[in-house]
Image: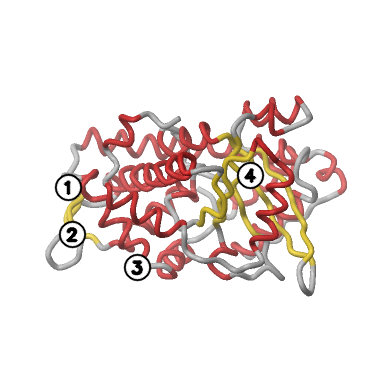
Amino acid sequence: MSDPADLQHIPDLLLQEIAIQDALPVHPAFQVFTDALKQRFGDALDAVILYGSCLRTSDLTEGIADFYVLISDYRLAYSSPLLAHLNNWLPPNVFYLEVPGSTSVMRAKYAVISTADFERGARQWFHPYIWARFAQPARLLHARDEQIRKRVHAAQANAVLKFVSSTLPMLESGPCDMETIWATGLMLTYAAELRAEREARARHLVQLDPEIYSKLTVAAVPALSPMLNLQIDGLYHIGSVSPLEKLKVRIHWRLRRWQGRVLSILRLSKATMTFRDCLDYAAWKIERHTGIKVEITPMLRRHPVLWGYKVMWQLLRRGVLR
């Protein structure tokens, strides 16, 4: 359960904005996925959250929908002790799901994590794997009860605060617009994972939902002052930090990059036991975002960890990752 002390520093307006955002309508086809996940996890299921590109486009013919499945207990969620252990050791576990659509098969990948780990990831994790994703727009498609709903809203609000507060020291003090804050944060978090999205992609994501990002930023200001304040002209003022603090933050982001590379390899290795065709999916996503085609040889298909190292080396050599 969330620590009450954490809820005290979350502005009420931020929780309200998260709740409004989470309740916005989605394409009816997403209900089919939700029903399948309810059936899959039964009494262990706490919540189902939709996020990612399909949330923005509702394209379920070419795209792959992204879900987070929050569960109460790993042992209750799986019949396999190994899967429960892996999920507890390095959350989340990622799985592939197909459901019948009106004209074709619809596809999704879903990440399984306990509600408690989700809360810790949004509030405390050093690496941005959770808080970078859920500072961004999402939809809460299912919650077991009102208590779980409030815990999810609080976790998302903490993710926003963690995301913005971790980004601000990387910017110059003085006037700054909302788009620059969020685009900079997205680029920092992309670099902290084995992801190769470019700055134009980060700005494009913010420009797709400027009203939502603006409302979240305004709502977060009371918890981030004096580091962030809203000016009369609609811009934000970023407070100054000492050279020592700025150096500390830069070191943190550098460490997140190296940590992210290790975690990406570990998660890819784990996904080979849970996510069918995970290598093909990863190769498709890399080519989609960078234009770089990564070959998957039969040997590398048998040894996905080697494939992960090969991909990272190719992207580093070409300057896509730094």
Asked whether, in this view, residue 118 is left or right of residue 228, the answer is right
What is the C-alpha distance between the residues marked 4 and 3?
28 Å
In this rendering, the label closer to the viewer, 2 or 4: 4
At mark 2, the secondary structure is strand
Q: Which residue is mark 1?
A: 239
Q: How many marks?
A: 4
Q: Which residue is mark 3?
A: 211
The residue positioned 78% from the left and 30% from the top of the image is: 79
- Res 111 label: 4
Label 3 environment density (alpha carbons within 10 Å; few <14, some 14–19, many ≥20): few
Image location of residue 89, percent across then percent down: 63, 26
- Res 133 label: none
Residue type pointed to by label 2: Pro
Q: Which residue is mark 2?
A: 175
What is the C-alpha distance between the residues marked 1 and 4?
37 Å
At mark 3, the secondary structure is helix
